[in-house]
Structures are given as structure tokens and as C-alpha cells.
Image (tube, helix red, strand yellow):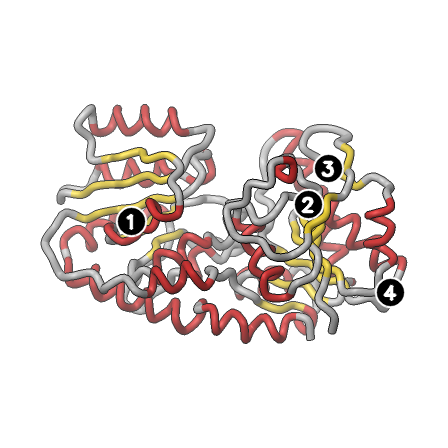
Amino acid sequence: MESPFQLMREWPPGYGGVERVAHELASAWGGTVYSFDAQSRSEDEIDALKVDYLRRVLPTCSPFGRLLLPLPSRVLWRLLRSSRPLYGHLPSPGVLLVLLLARLLKPDRPVFAHWHCFVAPEPGSKGQLFALYQWLALRVVPHLTKVIATSPVVATELIRCGCQQARVAVLPCCLNAEQEKILLAMPSRPITATPLRVLFIGRLDSYKRLDWLLEALSSLKDPWSLAVVGDGPRRLVFEALSGQLFGANAAVTFLGRLDEAAKVEQLASADVLVLPSDRSTEAFGIVQLEAMAAGMPSLAFQHHRSGMGWVGQLPGLSWSQQPDQLLMVLNQLATSPDLRRELGLEARERYLNLFARKVWLRCLQSVLS
């Protein structure tokens, strides 16, 4: 089969999970990546990762809010009339519309949807629009050639929502080859009685629930430290909460957004990564793979529409993966250096068995079949 055209809302590769997945696929497949370029990144061409494939911008309009829909154009017409496989990244109403049009114009053309996440319901008119989009998406994707999920958890939910099992494939996220090499080269954590070093990496927004992590740490009796990597609209709120809970001498450091080298330093020095997101919008978390490759457990909550909890499950850690047990797990890690090391070894083994790049490449071969 020919290398597929990819279609996405953002301009790859960027820093977000969807962009990183599209970038790795394009690096493996070749082919052109079409984008709505929602944040006008194509204007300055500043990329977080090396790009060696073609990219094209589709002209769009915005009827209201952040909704982007493709405008009639020669680029769009050529994309729709092509016989090459089309691979679209969801969620995006505009991408969904193009996938549907491509399917209707050429029913025999291979058309694929990469289902990155289920949209979480929200109150108000915005939430109603999200719900409407997802309702439509779940009626379109069963009629495409195949829908690709990032985890067995998401795949199971897609099947429950009406997709045929034979048309659902699982392709977890991956790290690029250079990242993997650097992280796997890190030595295993030594067994030391040093205070527990906790790491959080992510956009500082409400659904990331950094507040839950801060509140859990406030009840921890043993010494600890927390490094927060990332920025976002809720940073000042989280910093204020940290001050209220711990005072001026808190063992919490807000580092902001870091470059790749500085982030690797944080991964090398921490004992555990915690991603306490509470919505299905957070469906995988590529940073979990970075932590596990570095030999560190990753804690995340289980949700029936998200694979976050599944990614980091370890045989040596028995817990419900629900918010009410986060403090219990942190206490176990704080009081047992032996457990930290054991879980670190298990995390790296799980990475090698399920998420290593050579495993991902084997899975990739079967996606378009």
C-alpha cells in the first residue's frame, strides 16, 4: 500500500501528543502531512523535532470559537480526489468532515481515523458542541476502513460504541529513536534513603489536577520534593495553592517549560512521575513512556475511556488507580527505597516489552493492512 497522506488540525511536529504521533508516523511512512495549522506555526517554521517529510497547509475558516473547517481550495480538492490512503487524526470536526467526504467521493479508497481520545463532557454550550461532535464522530468512524486507538482501553470503548472489532487496531504512542537511546542508557535508581523525589510534567491546566497531587503531598509525613515542569493558564493558581499548603519554604519547584536536555535531567533525578489527570481527554501521556524508559514508575488514574492508567500499570504496585489512593501509594514510595527501585525496574521492563520503538514499528506494519 502507498504511504498515506496524513491530516490533522495542528501544524506538526509541535510539542503536543497528537503532533508527536503524526510526526513519528510521517517519519516512518514518508508521505505528505496536511494541516489546518490552527496556531499559524507554518509561518515561522520553528519545529521541536527534525522534519524530513512534506507538509501542506489547508485553507480554513472559523465559523465561531476555535472551530476550524476547510475552505474549498485546489489543495483540498487534490487531497479528496487522490486514491492514496488518507489517515486523519481526531478529535477535530474539520478533519472528521474531510475523512467523511473522502469516503463518500471514493468508497474504495482506504480512509483511516486515529482516535487519540474521547472528548470529556463539560457544562455549558461549549460542552454541548463537544458532545455533538463526538456523537457524530462515533457514527462516522465505524464506516471508515479502520480506526486506530492508542490503547486497548480506548479500543474496547470504541467497540462498545459501535465499531466492528475487525476494524479497530491498537497503536500505542512511541518515543523517537534518539529519545529512547538517551533514556534507556540511564542507570537504574540506587537504593538510597533520600527523600522521595516526585516529578510532574504537563500543561498547567485545570484537568491536569496538579492540585490533587499537591494536596496528597501535604498529607505525606516523610520528606519529599516536587519538581513541576510545564506552563499554562493555571500556573499562578497552582503556585498560590502550593504557597498556602506549604509556605514560602515549600519543597515544590515550578520550573516552567524546559528544553529537551533540561527535561531529561529532571527525568534522571526523579523517583516517580505523577500525572493525576481526571478527564478522558488525557488518553495516553507520552511523557509516561519517557519516565518508564528512564527507569521510573508513572502514576496515573484509571478511566474507562482513557489509557493513562493502563500505560503505567506495574505488577509490583497494587492499587485502584483512583484519586483516593494516591496518598497511600506516595507514602509507600516515600518509606521504601527498595520499592522505588523495584518499580523502576518493572517500569523499564514494561516499556521494553510494550512500547519500545522496535515493538512500535512491528505494530505499525499491521495498521494499514
The image shows residue 121, relative to residue 162, as above or below, that is above
Q: CA distance from mark 4 to mark 2?
A: 22 Å
Q: Secondary structure at mark 2?
A: loop
Mark 4 highlights which residue? 107
> Is tag 4's residue or tag 2's residue first in the polypeptide sequence?
2
Task: Indicate the amino acid at tag 1.
Answer: Glu
> Is tag 2's residue or tag 3's residue first in the polypeptide sequence?
3
- Tag of residue 265: 1
> Is tag 2's residue or tag 1's residue first in the polypeptide sequence?
2
> Is tag 3's residue or tag 1's residue first in the polypeptide sequence?
3
Observer-side mark, 3 or 1, equals 1
Image coordinates for residue 183, horizontal then vertical, percent = 34, 60
Image coordinates for residue 169, horizontal then vertical, percent = 62, 69
Does 120 sit left or right of 61 as displayed? Answer: left
Task: Indicate the amino acid at tag 4.
Answer: Pro
Mark 3–mark 4 contact, CB under 8 Å?
no
Q: CA distance from mark 1 to mark 4?
A: 50 Å
Mark 2–mark 3 contact, CB under 8 Å?
yes
Q: How many marks?
A: 4
- Tag of residue 68: 3
Q: Report the residue at 30% width, 65% height from top.
A: 185
Does 138 sit left or right of 291 as displayed? Answer: right
Q: Report the residue at 63% width, 60% height from top.
A: 158
Q: CA distance from mark 3 to mark 1?
A: 38 Å
Mark 2 highlights which residue? 92
Observer-side mark, 2 or 1, equals 1
